[in-house]
Every structure is written in structure tokens, then in C-alpha cells.
Amino acid sequence: METPVLQAININKYFLDPVRFRVLKDISFSIGRGSFVSITGKSGCGKSTLLYILSTMDTDYEGELFLDNEALQEKDNAALALVRNQKIGFVFQFHYLIEEFNVLKNVMLPAMKLGKFSNEMIEQKAMQHLKTLGIYDQALKNASQLSGGQKQRVAIARALINDPLIIMGDEPTGNLDKKNSDIVFGIFKEICLENKQTTLVVTHDPDFAKRADRIIQMEDGKILL
Amino acid sequence: MKTRLLLNIALALLMARLKQSIVAAAGVTFGIAMFIALISFMTGLNKMLDSLIINRTPHIRLYNAVAPSKTQPVDRAGEFAGFRNFIQSVKPKDEGKRLYNASRIIKAIRADGRVIDVAPKISTTVFFNSGTIQLSGMIDGVDVQLEQKLFHLNDNIIQGTISDLGTVNNSIIIGKGLADKLIVKPGDVVQVTTPDGDIAMLKIVGIVQFGIAEVDDVQSFTSLQTAQKLQGKPAGYITDIQVKLKDITLAPVVAKEYARLFDMDATDVQTANAQFETGTTVRNTIAYSVSVTLLVVAGFGIYNILNMLIYEKMDAIAILKATGFSGNDVKTIFIQLSMVLGVVGGIVGVLLGYGLSLIISHIPFETSALPTIKTYPVNFGVTYYLIGVGFALITTYLAGLFPARKAAKVDPVVIIRGK
């Protein structure tokens, strides 16, 4: 078997407020390259908490975490920011577009931060992604002028701009209707198949979860197999 | 490249709250403009007030004080050595006011690198006769060129010029108050009586006014030669040596040095006019504290706006952090935001401050003390503009620093999960 993109070993997480409470209990799993994985479970089972630990944004946990064979638990915040910038793409339930910028600039921001390519190259790449996602004609509009589905697609384009190893979604279709959900699902599926990028999505939409390659079912902070 | 990207984001966030940003920048503008106008005006006034006295006063004056001998004859007598000698009714010694060896001393002082120049002076009291009335007064015999060079006497001469003293024989420039009392004008001849009883006729070539009644009522000027003739003294008779230094703060030290070196009395300008320095310091302190207060208030304005902006732009901060901007990047963005307000506000403030100073410098200001000054004095020194801008940058940096640190600490998970 090839080396996993993401590997979690004995992850434990406690909430301290209002009382010490163990949210995640010895979570261990790994995800291979190019797979489409969904994490599902009831509200409060810890699936989002797990995702934010995997995403490197939450650093307050016990256990070991490897992304692309790099140990993440030892890195400081600045190094983790770089990891997020290069290797992880995010799509949240809410689009989090910056209203002051137009669609194109929103998509370009993470790549400009990375600074690997010239601005012209980044712009070309961003336009390419917008074209693939079918919102090419909205590129110069302000983010606030788009519909909900369009915004979510812009957010996906932004997640893809740095060719991340893994794309993480937290209820990416939570705010969308059936039609737009299908579109978003289609996009994720395509990303996995064509670019061999890994997709990890937290959802409690059973339809969405079922269509993934692999489902991780969670209950009470534990993974059910 | 990276800084430009961050600046780009900062500007975009600024545009989101353009109105408040303008108000915040206006606070800085106002602070700096007032600082510059106030300081320019204050220092301009200070300079003028100082010039009233300090410029007309030598930094060091060498003279012979009327005083008893420090060593009385009895102290020199060997048989009374070791005793305590009491002498009653000691009188000042009679050596006159004349400075001996004056021309050599002047030459020696002029060779000193710390000195701008040296001017000799003869000072004597006289009576001005008008009919049967005698008015007491002072005549200063001065070296015409040096007096103008060191003390700008011409600034106070309201009729005629100081150079007339050199060209017209037996001429005199008299104080305004004196001229009014004697009812004379330039071209008239005035009769003076010296302390020794000699009578001389002097032609009035100018009127001088210092704006201080006690001075204007008694003071008059003539050339060195005329003063010597008047008293029947030989050429080389001098009672005062006036020294101007390049650095006025050295005056007390140099005065002591000269007093020891030339064995005569010396006073420095600081001792003679202590109250002026105090006044200058107090005025400067007031101007600085008012201006600094204005800028600090402007700083609080910026702090407030940025705090508000951070709460409003939590989402943007969260997504920037999620997509790989580090805490430091976010901090830089908000500090830059604040600095942009500081720079823009500062530049406009400098222009406005310059405009205000210009307006002040055109307001009419008539003073009898300085006949040549017609409008308020303003000091257009570049230093104050630089201080203003520097302070604006520091204030806005600090005002931005605390909100920026808060923004840097924003936990994206809390924001994103909260939605």
C-alpha cells in the first residue's frame, strides 16, 4: 500500500470548559492519496473537532498527526500556517469570501501569499479554476454580488489554487440546495479522480456521505468501523 | 512582494470603512497641523522675545567693577600676618572704569575659536541740557560696524542709520523717550554735560527705540572716537569689552575663564538674564504638551477604529489564517493599516500646519519694541515638521500595535465553528 497522505495516531482532545470533557477518544486512521473520504455522525460526536485538528488550525490535542509524512504536532504556528498554505485547501459551510475583493482576487490570495508564481501566472491559474467550476464570467464581480452556490464554488476555487495535497470541507453543502449540492459534490469527485488530490469532507448529509469512496462514521468521539 | 500583498489587503480593509478611516486620519491631521502651527508660532515668538534682550546683550561682558581691593595694605604687612585684621570704612579703589591693555585683550579674544566677534564700548553718564532743564542719560560709545554685526542695532533705529555715527563728526543717536522730552529731531543739535563738567554739542543723526521706557528715556549712542573726545580721554580708552560666542551655552564657563585670564570682572548672559531662559523653557513645554496631547487623542481615535474594524472583519481574518497567513502577517496588515492612516494624516497635517503658520505669519502685529516687525513672528524650522511626522508615525504605530496583536491572536477555529 502506498504511503498515506494523512495519518492520525491516537488523537485525544479535551474540552476544559465548563468541565473537563473528553471529546475525541484515541482516534487513529489514515487516508490514502486520491481518495474521497467523508466523516459523518450525529451533531456533537466530535467530527468537526476532529477536522479542525486535522486541519492544523486547532493545536490543542494529544497524539500524533502526519501530513505527507511530516509530523505536525511539533511545528509552531508560523510553520503550520505555511503547511496550510501549501498543502491544505479549505471549504467551509460559510464561504468566507472577503467582500472588499473581487472574485478573482479572492481566489488568488492564497497563491499570492505562497509567492511561488508571478501574479500573471496565478491569475491565469485562477481563471482556469473558475472556468472549470463554471463561474468564469463572474470573475471580476464583487464577492457580495454572487449567489450562494456561486460563492461556494469560488471558495472551492480558492481552496484549489495552490494545488493542495488534501482538500478539507466542513459541511461544504450545508447551506446549499439540492442542485447546488450536486454540483459541489461533482466538483469534489472530479478533483479526486483527475488530479489525484485527496478530499476529506465532514457532513451530516447522508446522501452526500454515501456517495464518497469511504465513510468514517463517528459516535461519541470514537470511530465506528 | 509579500509586504505589497499585505499592504494591498490592508488598503482593501481600509476602504471598507472609508468614512471612519477619514475621520481617524483627520484626527492625526488635526493633531499634527496644530502641533506645527503652535510650535512654529511659539518658537517664533520665543526667538523674538529672546532677541529683544539676548541679542542686544553681549554673551560675555568684561569690565572693571567698582569694588574695594581684595588685598588691603594691612594684609601685606609682615608684622600683622597671622592676625585677624579689622578695617573700618573701606572705600572702593580709584582705578576708574578704564580697561587697561584693551586692544591686546580684544585681539586675544578675537583669536579664540569659540568667539564670533568682540566689540569695545565706552559707557558714561551725561546730562542732556534743554534750556535750563538737565536730563540725565547714558551715552554708549560703540564701534559702528561691530555693534551692527553683533547686536543688530539698526533693527531698533527708527530714524536714520547707525552708519551715520561713523560718517558724521560729533554725532549722536538718542532714545525715543529722550528725544520726545528734549523736543528734538534728527538734524538738531543737543548739548550734553559730562560728569567732569565739560560741555559738548552733538548733532542728532537718528532716533533709537527699544520699547522699554526706562531704556528709551536715557539711552543714546555715539561713536567710540566721539565718546573718547567727549570725556577728554585718549584713543584706546575703553570701559567694556563685549563678546559674542558661537554657542551661547558656553558663556558661563568662558566668562570665568576670561575673568581669570585677563584679571577683570566678567558677567555672562545667563546670569544677567536668567528669567528669559526660564520663560522660553516654560513656553516650549506648554506648546509641546498641548501638541502631544492632541496627537495622543488622535492615536486613541485610530485605536478605536481599528478595534471596531477587527470585530467587523473577524471572518476575513479567520479565512486569511485558514488559508495560510500567519499571525504575524495579520499583525502586519493591521499595523500597516494604522500606519497608512498615520502617513496620509501626517502628510495632510504637515501641509495644513504649514498653511496655518503662513496665515499666522501674515497677521499684523505692531510692537513698539521691535519697529522692524510688522506681522507675528513664525519660525518655519524644518525640525518641527520632522518631529510632527515622526510623532504621528510613532503614535499610529502604537495605536495599531495593540489591535493588531489582538487580530494576530484571533483563533480561526472559534470564528469558523461559530457560524
Image (tube, coloured by chain):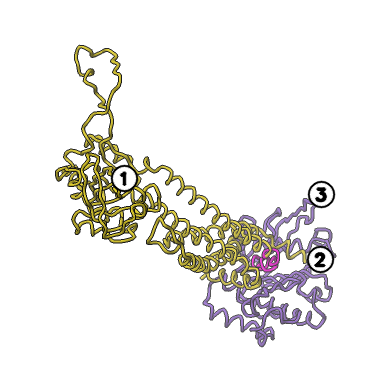
> Marks 1/2: CA distance?
120 Å
- Helix, strand or loop at label 3? It is loop
Chain in yellow in the render: B
Query: Which residue is label 3 attached to?
Result: A19
Q: Secondary structure at mark 1?
A: strand
Q: Are marks 1 and 2 on the same chain?
A: no
Q: Position of residue B412 (x, y in %)?
A: 69, 63
Label 1 belongs to which residue? B134
Circle 1 or circle 2, nearest the eye: 1
Pointer 2: residues within 10 angstroms few (<14), some, or many (20+)? some
Q: Residue at x 51, y 54 (%)?
A: B287
Tag 2: amino acid: Gln
Q: Which residues are magenta?
A: B309-322
Q: Position of residue A9 (x, y in %)?
A: 70, 57
The three-letter amino acid code for the residue at tag 1 is Gln
Q: Is residue A44 left or right of residue B376?
A: right
Q: Are marks 3 and 2 on the same chain?
A: yes
Q: Is residue B193 above or below residue A36?
A: above
Q: Of tags 3 and 2, which is closer to the observer?
A: 3
CB atoms of marks 1 and 3 within 8 Å: no
Spatial CA distance of label 1 from label 3 is 104 Å
